[in-house]
Image (spheres, rainbow, N blue to C red):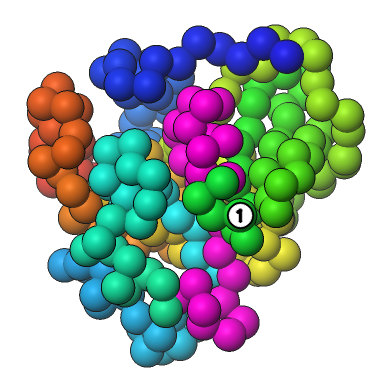
Amino acid sequence: MKLESEARADPGDWLRTVRQSLPRALSIARAMRPTWELRSLEELDSGFVQRERISGLLWDVDGTLTHYHGRSLAPEAEKWVAPLFREPGLRHAIVSNCDDRRLQELATMFPQLPVLKVYEGATARIGRRLLQGGDAWFELAGTGGGPVARPIDRPDARLVPLRKPSAEIIRFAVRQLDIEPAAVAMVGDQYWTDVAGANLGGVRSIRIPTVGRETFPSVLRWLQRVDGWMRHVLA
């Protein structure tokens, strides 16, 4: 299986995200306003999810749960996130724009959570779920209420990763959680990818400040500032 080349520490990866979403730039810009803007993960506690009737959380990783390409929960995130992972009845999934190598790493870090990605294939969109050591692939069809996911064998053809703010990724994730979209929220630190992706995908959005911002390469920190500027000017 050949995947689109994605550099681990390359700002071009962010630029590929922008290029993929440029045809929808106006609608994305209008969707950059989060449902909730929290001061830190500390505010996202059991009381919050119960009060807001949230049954499922979709998680960005770098800058949200970990430092840049971190291999464990960031210390400033673990204290608040670990109780949520143990919250009865609350379901979780990982939704990241990372490359394939990092995706496998996330599956090792979060073995009990579905780690999800969507690709553009030659004839159909393909969903992927890494969970408890398994690697499942699905052909996606339909849009009303989320894509229907038909299990398939691992594809051999070239696949191009879709990236947040793709609504298809969010819809696939909601279907994997098996929860109504109204009860799901996406948690992330970026307006363009996490917030807009959630809003376009029909779920609520929770924006938090970037965790471990100092661990990101300087060019990515600059792009994060651009992301914040776009949110306040365009949304």
Looking at the picture, does residue 63 appear above or below residue 57? above
| Residue 78 pos. (x, y %) | 33, 66
Q: Quadrant of the N terminus?
A: top right
Residue annotated with mark 1: 111
Please give the name of the residue rendered at 71% of the width and 36% of the height, measured from the top-left corner. Answer: 127
> How many callouts does the rendering have?
1
Please give the name of the residue rendered at 81% of the width and 44% of the height, measured from the top-left corner. Answer: 149
Please give the name of the residue rendered at 51% of the width and 38% of the height, measured from the top-left corner. Answer: 105
In the rendered structure, which amino acid carries the disc numbered 1? Answer: Pro
User: Which of the 4 image quarters holds residue 4?
Assistant: top right
Is disc 1 surrounded by few (<14), some (14 to 19) or many (20+) residues within 10 Å?
some
| Residue 88 pos. (x, y %) | 58, 85
Q: Nearer the viewer, residue 160 or 70?
A: 70
Give the left or right position of residue 69, taking residue 95 as reference: left
| Residue 3 pos. (x, y %) | 61, 15
Give the left or right position of residue 229, taking residue 42 as reference: left
Q: Is residue 178 visible?
A: yes
Magenta span contains residue 4:
no
User: Which of the 4 image quarters holds residue 51?
Assistant: bottom left
Looking at the picture, does residue 103 appear above or below residue 58? above
Magenta span contains residue 104:
yes
Q: Nearer the viewer, residue 30 or 183?
A: 183
| Residue 174 pos. (x, y %) | 63, 57
Give the left or right position of residue 8, taking residue 175 as reference: left
For the record, the magenta segment spans 84-107
Q: Quadrant of the C terminus?
A: top left
Looking at the picture, does residue 120 appear above or below residue 29? above
Q: Is residue 195 visible?
A: no
Looking at the picture, does residue 111 appear above or below residue 103? below
Please give the name of the residue rendered at 25% of the width and 61% of the height, measured from the top-left corner. Answer: 75
Helix, strand or loop status at disc 1:
loop
